[in-house]
Image (spheres, helix red, strand yellow):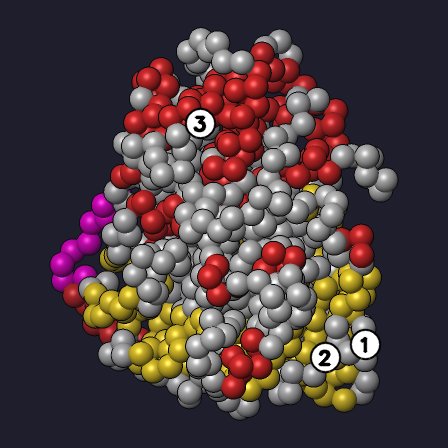
Amino acid sequence: MNKVFGIKPAATSWLAIGLLSLTAIGCGDSGKETAAPETASAETSADSRADHIRKTTATINGTRIQAAASSEPGNWLAHGRTYDEQRYSPLKQINTETASDLGLAWYWDTGTTRGLESTPIVVDGVMYNSGSWSMVWAHDAVTGELLWEYDPQVPREWGVYACCDVVNRGVALWQGKVYVGTIDGRLVALDAATGDVVWDVKTTPEGKPYTITGAPRVVKGKVIIGNGGAEYGVRGYITAYDADTGDEEWRFYTVPGDPTKPFENPAMEHAASTWRGGEWWKVGGGGTVWDSMAFDPELDLLYVGTGNGSPWNRYIRSPGGGDNLYVSSILAIDPDNGALVWHYQTTPGDSWDYTATQHMILAELTIDGEPRDVLMQAPKNGFFYVIDRKTGEFISAENYVPVTWATHIDKETGRPVENPEAQYANETKLVFPAPYGGHNWHPMAYNQDTGLVYIPALDIPFAYGQDNAFKYNERTWNTGVDVTQTSPPKDPDTLAAALGMVKGHLSAWDPVNQKEVWRVQHEMSWNGGVLTTAGNLVFQGRADGHFAAYAADTGEMVWEAPVHVGIIAAPVSFEVDGTQYVSVVAGWGGAYALASGVPRHKSNVLTEGRILTFKVGGDVELPEPQVTYLDIPTPPASDASEAVIAQGDTLYHTQCSVCHGPGVIASGGSLPDLRYSSAAVHDSWNAIVRDGAYTGKGMAGFAEVLTVEESNAIQAYVISATNLAIEMCKGDYRENYPETVGNACVRASVEP
Ligand code: CA
């Protein structure tokens, strides 16, 4: 038993099963996606709208984005609104006084069921969003009318490589073009007026398990794009493309390649000296730049955050020790040529998936009486960092969530002091934070008026154990972490205790004094990104299917509205014709939703995503979802032995649960809950699981990974889990223990 929590690590390890229960499945789709609804628009008005877009977007460039903080309060031109990524809107028509009168101006259902993580870009009344499978939509920002849509036709089987859902965090806009990175590794430039493709380049090597989910940034006429895939084993890098032509201008790798070959640059030679033993280059090394960037035009530095090493486990990745540069690092790069200027590594020799790809904010803070140009980040490792962004010098760091892997960050060296109790080479250890992080990709915000940074924080533990049988496989997750004890506890009290450890909150953090000023505790983890405004407000959507506004100085909730679907994306604010709007994209999904096995909240009931826009006095009503309870179909009889079911349990939690959920509880709702498998699915089990009969829905075939016997064992385990759920749903179980059975018995069907 764990002394601190009184819960065995095995009881909590399932929380991260998706992360742990690695391997090939790559999340497919429920097959529910439908064509976007038609919207009628007269041709003449479409033409004039296209002219309007051409006129208003042709001049978007670095000067405009740089000046937008003061000169364009009504627009949201870039991912973090401005290059400093503060996500602070200077608008204040919506404020602590008027927020209570907020109402819906419009909403638009996306027709997709996967996670939505997009930050809208809004330019002079036109809104651009990306969605599942890297689709792009342009809407009239005042009416919600769809102006155009673009589907890059990502082959659905590429979902096998999307560790954390087929999401996309947004587009970039520059001189009349919209840029989007695609799940299958392309960077596409679209005509902002029509959505027509201008150019389309493949930015990742053919056949390698890279994916793109992050928003591009455009700096000095170059589109900067990274990629993901460190769990599958890739070498991280970022690339700059000419915004006009799509020609490659430079590429910077974040980790060294094969040291017997020439190094690309001095930074790689230096980095290689920090990797000792092992053959990391065969697994790729990791360090992927899958999300965060910022740009300082005056210092002329581009900042990027890098991800975890491949595999996670450093005892396998670099058994001789070393920091393993530049994984889990903040890099300052010369945007003209891609040369490394400085680096700061948040987690040297990372062994816990503690990426530093999280949101970075640039600001001026007064520290010890002196104005300092700083970069702030709350990476997964649980510490909030303030760094001098000119030099990379460490200024300060304190933990913003409970942290057990390190005791503190040493003020002299800027290095963490590791807790030996978090080293899991010889013994499984329960560690805070989990691989989900104390904070993940969900954007923070910095309010210049309150001086506070608002962090969408996660409180989740994780049990790490050494995988002594680790063997690299390109189609599976490569973590080097043991995944054999990932089945959720079946005892309801143990399960409830484990669930009780999983929380989320909104933290208002004073970066100068490195302390929390207020917090809003949420019922669930994995809530939305954050927006702050000059109206003394912080907006955040929640996992419980609500969108809310809090006073930026006190944290008092001043408004909330149900939207019936969980929100993970960050809101934006903009103004058109004197009216201020706040928009957010709602769509439950991402790593935690797919993989945690923690059920959706009872008010997060829709699986279909929607874009919502609010204004003071808005009076559009959302339809109330009709929730019905569906009985679980009786599965086919099985005479499998306990040993076969146990084998199926282990295989399921190595191959399947990353998408279908631990314990066969599909908590996200966007992928099939296998307990509801029909007789036809059970009849065609091996055709689907091994032969790829559902490839078009994103369910790749696993014939290379699973034998018929193994596939049958997984089916036996699924049947056993189904029977358990049917048993649990009887009597008053639905009322008393809804959280312990996931969505089964609780919400099986929603009829809008
Ligand atoms: Ca990772």
x and y percentages locating residue 359 in the rendered image = 57, 66
Relative placement, left or right, of 358 versus 105 is: right
Measured in 3D between alpha carbons, the distance from the residue under mark 3 to the one under mark 1, in whole angstroms, is 52 Å
Does 176 sit above or below residue 692?
below
- Single out the mark in the foreground, 3 or 1: 3
Q: Which residues are magenta?
A: 37-46
In the picture, the disc for residue 335 is none
User: Which of the two discs, 2 and 1, labels the residue nearer the N terminus?
Assistant: 2
In the rendered image, which residue does mark 2 sit on?
Answer: 394
Query: What's the residue type where badge 3 is placed?
Result: Glu
User: Which quarter of the picture shows residue 213?
Assistant: bottom left
The quadrant of the image that shows the C terminus is top left
Ligand 1 closer than 8 Å to label 3 CB: no
Q: Crowdedness of circle 1 by 10 Å Cα count: few (<14), some, many (20+)?
A: few
Query: What's the residue type where badge 2 is placed?
Result: Phe
- Is 41 contained in the magenta span? yes
Q: Residue furthest right?
A: 3
Does 7 sit above or below residue 412?
above
- Is 52 contained in the magenta span? no
Measured in 3D between alpha carbons, the distance from the residue under mark 2 to the one under mark 1, in whole angstroms, is 8 Å
Q: Along the line of sight, which residue is nearer the eye, 2 or 107?
A: 2
In the rendered image, which residue does mark 1 sit on?
Answer: 411
Query: What's the residue type where badge 1 is placed?
Result: Lys
Q: Along the line of sight, which residue is nearer the eye, 155 or 175?
A: 155
Helix, strand or loop at mark 2? strand
In the rendered image, which residue does mark 3 sit on?
Answer: 710
Helix, strand or loop at mark 1? loop
Does 583 sit above or below residue 708?
below
x and y percentages locating residue 421 in the rendered image = 80, 52
Q: Residue at x 70, y 33 (%)?
A: 11
Q: Residue at x 25, y 52 (%)?
A: 153
